[in-house]
Amino acid sequence: MTFADKVILFNKTLSYTGPALPPGIRIMNPFKEFEQTIAIANTFYHKYYNDNNARHLILGINPGRFGGGITGIPFTDPKRLVSECHIDYKGKPAHEPSSVFVYEVINAFGGPEVFYKKFYINSLFPLGFTKVEANGKEKNYNYYDSKELLNTVSDAIVGNINKQVALGVSTDACFCFGTGKNENIFRRLNNEHGFFKKIVALEHPRFIMQYKALNKQFYIDKYLGAFNNCE
């Protein structure tokens, strides 16, 4: 099996079977909710991962509604799917700021073909969460946004990290998107389970786009320095 075959199988069997989630929180599984997602992801992984390269793993938090929550490809919204990966998408061209930043980094690194030969992106919890607000609208929710949810899904996070390591990634280092709670939780789990020799944390793309947009080039350069340092 190629790296692509392993990821596609991982995606097809991705589900949550742990304890019941706290009230008002639901799982968001793009591979089951949207008919075209499996086909999109299969095309993407066959295009960029149809080999047996030992890539470095990059782990975010969990997918958002307008990026990986639609396309099934972490940090790739429908607009970037079409414009940067040249893969067809039928539907509303949703926009996710994190995806904008990530693809600026990818293009600065040499483009998707070069970047994806060396890196595989996913999340500590590969499925998304949403919460219904008082006005009835759904919003993105992070696995650590409540202690109750974190405790509920901790075993699932550990299991999913193990499954992603088993895809054949390099274990000398893993990159973490998020220098706050995501990093702290990931480091604790890594200390307990020894997934990787070291974790390299980078500011989350959403944080950069929301709060540090004027200094975006600084963070692009920081990302590139970290990624080039692991080669």
Image: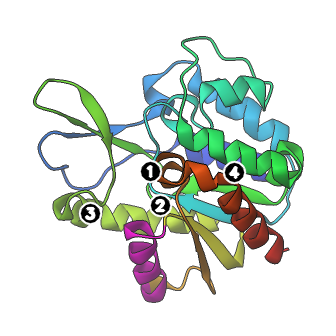
N-terminal of the pair, mark 2 or mark 4, is: 4
- For the residues labelled 1 and 2, the Cα–Cα distance comes to 6 Å
The residue at the point 58 percent across, 26 percent down is 37
Mark 2 vs 4: CB contact within 8 A: no
Q: Considering only vertical position in the picture, is 75 above or below 55?
A: above
Tell me if residue 157 comes above or below residue 104 in the rendering.
below
How far from the left and from the top, in percent, is residue 12? 55, 39
Q: Is residue 156 left or right of residue 3?
A: left
CA gap, disc 2 and disc 3: 11 Å
Q: Is label 4 or label 3 in front?
A: 3
The Cα atoms of the two marked residues, 2 and 4, are separated by 18 Å
| Residue 168 visible somewhere in the drawing | no
Type of the residue with mark 4? Lys
Which of 212 and 134 lies nearest the eye of the viewer?
A: 212
What secondary structure predominates along the stretch shown in magenta?
helix
Verify CB contact (< 8 Å) between mark 1 and mark 2.
Answer: yes
Determine which quarter of the picture holds residue 171. bottom right
Which numbered circle lies on residue 124?
2
Question: Which residues make up the magenta segment?
Answer: 179-192
Outermost front residue = 214
Amino acid bearing label 2: Leu
**Residue at x 46% of width, y 72% of height:** 183
**Of the pair 17 and 142, the residue shown nearer to us:** 142
| Amino acid at pointer 1 | Asn
**Alpha carbon separation for disc pair 1 and 3:** 12 Å
Could you tell me which secondary element the residue under label 1 belongs to?
A: loop
